[in-house]
Amino acid sequence: MIAPTKPDLVTVNVDGKDVSVPKGTNVIEAARLVGVDVPYYCYHPKLSIVGNCRMCLIEMGMPAVDPATKAPIMDPATGKQKINWIPRPQIGCATNASPGLHIRTNTPQIKDCREGVMEFLLINHPLDCPICDQAGECKLQEQSTGYGRGYSRFIEQKNVKPKRTQLGPRVTLDDERCILCSRCIRFCKEIVKDDVLGFIDRGSYSTLTCYPGKALSNNYSLNTVDICPVGALTSTDFRFKMRVWFLKQTNSIDTESSVGANTVVWSREGIIYRITPRRNDEVNDTWLSDSARDLYKPVRATDRLTASRVNGVDRTLDMAINAAGELLNAAAGAVAVVGSGRSSVEEQFLTRKLAEALHASTHLVSRVGEGDTILISADRNSNVRGALVTGLIKALPSAKLTALAAAIDGGQVKAIVSMGEDLTMAGLTAAQLAKVPIVYVGTHQNPTVAAAKVVIPSGMVFEKSGTFVNQQFRLQKFFKSVPPPVGVADDLVVLAKLTAAVRGGAVPSELHAVWTLLAADVPAFKAISFSNLPETGLLLDATAFAGLPFVEGETMHFQPAKANA
Amino acid sequence: MAAPQQRRLIFKHIDEPGYTNDLACYQRHGGYEILKKAVRMPPPAIIDEVKKSGLRGRGGAGFPCGVKWGLVDRKSGKPIYLIVNADESEPGTFKDRYIIHQDPHQMIEGVMISCWANNVKQAYIYIRGEFPHGARILEKAIAEARAANLVGPNLLGTDYSCEIYVHRGAGAYICGEETGLIESLEGKRAYPRIKPPYFPAVLGLYQCPTIVNNVETLCHVKHIVDMGGDEYAKIGTPNNTGTRLLCVSGHVQKPGYYEYEVGKITLGELLNEVCGGPLPGRTFKAVIPGGSSAKILKFGETFTLKNKDGSTRTLTVEELPMDFDTLAAAGTMGGSGGVIVMDDSVNMVEALANINAFYAHESCGQCTPCREGSLWMKKITARMVHDTARADDGVLLKSVADQIAGRTICAFGEACSWPTQSFIAKFGDEFKSYPETKKVAKADGALELV
Amino acid sequence: MVNLFEILMNLKPETLRQIDEVITHYPVKRSAVLMLLHAIQEDVGYISQEAIEWIAQKLELQPINVYEVVTFYPMFRQKPIGRRHIKVCRTLSCALMGGYKTCETFEKEFNTHRGEVSPDGEVTIEFVECLASCGTAPVVMIDDDLHEKVDVAKAKQLSASLKQEAAQRR
């Protein structure tokens, strides 16, 4: 007996199992909900339906009713309503759930359909697996193993097509491997609105290309590599670097802007090889900008800070902490703490604690650029809202620290702590930097580092775990993928030690312990812990910040609040 | 007994001495009188007549025209388009060519009547690129008709307007498929659309409700409105009404076009009596009755068909009446009426190789089974003829064809696999023995098919 | 808005007039692609890169949209051909009546192979698919004109008259 369903849900039957799905859900997704795998290539949940690969063919039937009376016709054998099965298989991606829809995916006909499609895809496909980057994450490999016949009957000549074309600055194309699913074309046209890819020629000689002289160069070109089911489109940067089955996947968050796109960081033995998008239907769907994927490159840059230093001399962390403590205590009451809009929520919270212990003023530097309306917002800091929510700042930051500069000149500020911000970029002059001692906690060399009395190296986002609050006021967590270079301590440890050194009392430095404090201290974080935070994030109550003039414009899944009259 | 007489309804004036393709000549022969009658009828009444007539599409699918018109979404508020499918590309078919070149006004009158009946304000004639003179003739004919208020604004003084434009294709058989045609008309590669949801009657040209009809079908509409649907239904045979243009080519004495009441002539009468039988010294071997996509018939085979009362009758190839239903029951189809005849000089492997090359060339390439399968079948038969043939290549061919039919976006999947399936089914032995028979040296000037 | 990088095409005024007129036939400009390609090919003889970009600009499309179409439809060529275009049907009915021999004859008469420009620059010979005149097979189109029942003898005749026209022209 089928239980009554909610108004917008319909019950469909997949291989004998009933499942309730929202009306209109396609068969592939409906089957997924009951653990039935319907294979496909050209279908993508975020792109238009084309139905050209024919891999998702399934058998479809509707309950039989008497045409005149509309009464159900029963099947005496089963005692249930007779199902009229359509003899011709239908594609699952284009078949939407309607009440009573019955689907069969495990019949001999469907098995034959899948074997047929697999065979057809492989007959002109080059035997490139040993040299193809896609191996290990290739839909053709997976589905030929799962649904293919297992042997070849093709003895003719395979089609020859252009083989390593530079389709764009970051994408390499091998036309022989292409199965003409058109995902890349649809992506460029529908998501990026850059209609630059197309098929030329006809039939089995159809070939993916750009118009001669044009290139796939938009800042989302690498998404075509992500969605290409085979090794036709590959990342030129990642080409031949590493087999994917050796890589560890860690969930992270993109720090390019306040969009907070969800990512996966792929690493092996402490080295990062690539970043790819992670699906979040509320934030970035399945997409990520190309520029965001380069953000791991500075991890191993030569200007990376790897040693604590006091007055230019390498010291241990504790010696640096002591020196910093002395310096800051000497300037007590006249310290400025410059936090960062790129620090994690936990770091910003502990920065606030440090500032309170020092009775210091707090500052943040804004980074504003032009939003691209897709996944890069105008706010190039990933966590300004974290600073607001944790109470580190009360108002939105500006690009230049003019108040601080004046305070330095006027003698009101006698020491500065900078959490990774290059103060010269915020308008401070070399003279001002020379005038007051600086404790710098950060990752890379810059003029402020050169001027600082105490330098303590810290980790990049890939080397720690934590959370950010994105433009939607969504709290999202990221995990540590690789250990920081030798000599670099965890930021929370550094902040806790600094706080202790300035007589601020004991502050936890372990992530979960910090969260216990956060949940108690910050109303917006009540009852939240790092472990119970969902993988897709949690929307915070932002009413306290409504009316602030945030800089972001429209991007994917984000509409700026209407300006107050 | 003498063969049945032709009934030249559509082809009445084709090859008639002194008949020219201008408006004046057409009007001298009563042209556009039916259009004048039609615009005095309410449009639903015309659709009704077409439904009663039982007219089935003459482009190849044989789908009832009245039903097709009945499926049009008239509630969406979007404009309704009518497209004339003048892409005539099915191998073996050559009928629309003559209507377009010699009697274009008959078609235009049929188009205008159909537009009136369906509240269409804009019609396009999609004409294949290889009919350049035809396109010019049509443009001239439309201009003449427009000047006489028979096309365009304020038709015949009413406040109904309907414009016709000619749109030229450029050498793609797949543009004969209605949704491929629509894509081509929209200026794109002719990739047929998935159905559901893109049924032309609902989401056609520019995502508006669209009717796509064959040239000959639209001419029949004129005659239906002239004599009335019931009268028209008396012509031909039940469920296979009206007349049909049959195009005979290949190994007969008198190839050409002939128009008969549907089902009132048998294949044998057509080939032996009307077309003069086989060429001297030859015997018929095989015939494709409905364009190259139709399944082939082997002379000598018989068909046991069910009668209405449950009894059966057994017919030879020659005894098959040329109507849609009987040919379908015999495992082939009436299709576009292109009858291709092969005699005993033809090697069936080579004939199939010729056909497979056609489909491989014409496949649009959108969906996997047809794109890869059609080229694979071509490569197999080409290898068999020009390189090494294996005795079980026929088995492989059939297996490949079976993986295509029923699994594609459009009927091209069936079109490219039915020839292979039927050739192997009927002439399997020839495929099996081909490795041996091909070794026998051919006579000088022997037939080359691929 | 004036496009400072407007691609220049040396089209005849009549062609330009035709093009502007045909664009008005469609509610969506893109539909005019095929008609524009025909017009330009008839004027210039083939479709150049320049032409593709010109059409794209004219119809507010991306060049790839036009390029895709040019390569899909076999009637459009991207390189110039011989002065006369000989298209021999190779599909079943014409093949059954000797179409392949017809093509061979043309090739021999002009000392060329299919797809090339003959040494005298006079012809390009190609196979095409069914031209819808199967009853009068083998059929051949020379430019826009259909020639029926072109057996080996008639092929030689047609070749001779093409050569004669060529000679008279020079």
Image (cartoon, coloured by chain):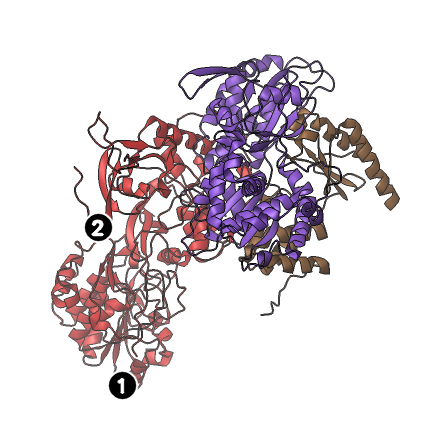
Chain colours: A red, B purple, C brown
> Could you tell me which chain the residue with mark 1 belongs to?
A
Q: Nearer the viewer, mark 1 or mark 2?
A: 2
Picture coordinates of residue A317, whole percent (x, y): 23, 63
| A296, C110: nearer the viewer | C110
Picture coordinates of residue A293, whole percent (x, y): 38, 55
Q: Could you tell me which quadrant the C terminus of chain B lies in?
A: top right
* Left or right, residue C69 beside residue B251: left
Q: Answer yes or no: is residue A465 visible.
A: yes
Q: Is residue B342 above or below residue A289?
A: above
Q: Could you tell me which quadrant the N terminus of chain B lies in?
A: top right
User: What amino acid type is highlighted by mark number 1?
Assistant: Gly
Q: Label 1: which residue?
A: A411
Q: Is residue A155 above or below residue A61?
A: above
User: What amino acid type is highlighted by mark number 2?
Assistant: Pro
The residue depicted at 42 percent of the width and 25 percent of the height is A151
The residue depicted at 60 percent of the width and 67 percent of the height is C3
| B118, A108: nearer the viewer | B118
Q: Label 2: which residue?
A: A7
> Could you tell me which chain the residue with mark 2 belongs to?
A
The residue depicted at 46 percent of the width and 30 percent of the height is B404
Q: Secondary structure at mark 1?
A: loop
Figure quadrant of residue A479: bottom left
Q: How many C-alpha atoms fall within 10 Å of the one at disc 2: few (<14), some, or many (≥20)?
A: few
Q: Is residue B416 above or below residue A474?
A: above
Picture coordinates of residue A251, whole percent (x, y): 28, 51
Picture coordinates of residue A421, whole percent (x, y): 32, 70
| B396, B429: nearer the viewer | B429
Figure quadrant of residue C119: top right
